[in-house]
Image: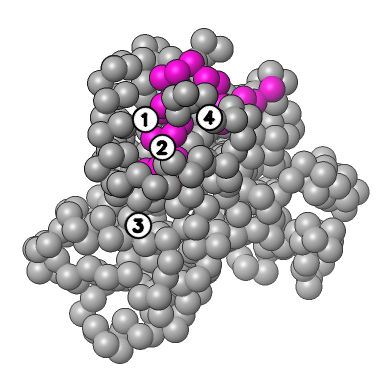
Amino acid sequence: MNIFQTVDRHSSVLPEIYRNMTVSELEDRVKAIKNKLGSKLFIPCHHYQKDEVVQFADATGDSLKLAQLAEVNREAEHIVFCGVHFMAETADILTTKNQKVYLPDMRAGCSMADMADMFQTERAWDKLGKLFGKTILPLTYVNSTAAIKSFVGQHGGATVTSSNAEKMLKWAFNQQQRILFLPDQHLGRNTAFHLGVGLDEMAVWNPINDELEFDGPVEKVKVILWKGHCSVHENFTVENVADIRRNYPTMKIIVHPECKREVVELSDMAGSTNYIIEAIGRAEAGSAWAIGTEMNLVKRIINEHPDKHIMSLNPHMCPCLTMNRIDLPHLTWCLELIDQGILHNIIEVNEKEAKFAKLALERMLAHV
């Protein structure tokens, strides 16, 4: 009996045999399958993945870039997305029916994306409609489920990324008087504030209490921020900034716009993952940086730039726990099942959801 005859093809639990393999055994198995499948296999890896996985990436980048690379790669029959669930969903939306998208560990979700589900969103839309009439356009961060992207697409809205959020808010304000921004309140707040929207013109929708959090007259509201956040970036604090300023007065602080408004305000620079990578890449040798983003990426940047003094803005920060569920054993297991023709851990978005989610993505791509 071989290994594949012992695997329950419907189980999402990693077989013990993979946990007991050495790193070199796992690496050799991945290399063998990559060589065997060649161009039929495409492995995109998000920047926040562990190095043990990234070493086998055919492409690295943010979630949308990787999904777009999957879209244009018509040779690949198997797309093994090393990221989280919503990223693999986007890849499935953009690729053909003949291509299969896999997630090596189905537990790899995103806490931010999970903070906005369809039931909450439909209830919110109904209540907000009663408050504001037909004056609201929904936008959603790409870090959201296919269902939320689909909802936004059906209601005339679009997706945004951390790098194009400003352009998309400008576009949205040309369509409607008010914006509902899902699911990350911090990216929405930081972007709107940078465009000149006052903090006193931003309300927060609390999906748990099913109510609008706002002290002033509701007619003053221009942006409604969904009360969601990134569990990684929310852990960077003003105290972290103060510690850097006190202990390293010449060090520059660069953070992701998923951080809280007060942290972004006190930092020297703020921008998307690619913005951070490129800024450090352009920086002079000997320069000093504190980076406010996910730890796996920070460590990789440190290793790639030994000529610079680089550290995490929060020295006690942990990597993204859900992203880290994708590890070398799960990647090996996923690839060996593919090699044996066993369909497992496939991500599929239903046709109706995919249609309107793709519309939301296309509206964004047409304006950036």
Question: 84 and 122: which one is in front?
Answer: 84
Which of the two discs, 4 and 1, labels the residue nearer the N terminus? 4
Residue highlighted by disc 1: 43
* Front one among 194 and 359: 359
Question: Could you give the CA–CA distance between mark 4 and mark 3, rounded to whole angstroms?
Answer: 34 Å
Precedes in sequence: disc 4 or disc 3: 4
Q: Circle 3 is placed at which residue position?
A: 296
Q: Nearer the viewer, mark 4 or mark 1?
A: 4
Q: Give the side of residue 78 with respect to residue 128, left or right.
A: left
Label 1 to label 3, Cα distance in Å? 18 Å
Q: Residue at x 24, y 83 (%)?
A: 248
Residue 46 place in picture, x, y as percent: 39, 42
Per the rendering, the mark at residue 6 is 4
Residue 291 horizontal/vertical position (percent): 33, 66
Secondary structure found at label 3: helix
**What is the spatial separation of the Cα atoms under label 4 and label 1, in whole angstroms?**
26 Å
Crowd class of label 2 (few under 14; some 14 to 19; many from 20; radius 10 Å): many
Circle on res. 356: none
Which element carries disc 2, helix, strand or loop? helix
Residue 177 highlighted magenta (yes or no)? no
Q: Residues within 10 Å of mark 3 (few under 14, many from 20)?
A: some
- Specify few, some or many for label 4: CA neighbours under 10 Å numbering under 14, 14-19, or 20 or more: few
Q: Earlier in the sequence, mark 2 or mark 3?
A: 3
Q: Which residue is mark 2?
A: 331
Q: CA distance from mark 2 to mark 4?
A: 18 Å
Q: What's under tag 4, amino acid-wise?
A: Thr
Magenta stretch bounds? 326-350
Q: Magenta stretch containing residue 342, yes or no? A: yes
> Is there CB contact under 8 Å for labels 2 and 1?
yes
* Residue occupying the point 37% across, 39% down: 45
Q: Quadrant of residue 55?
A: top left
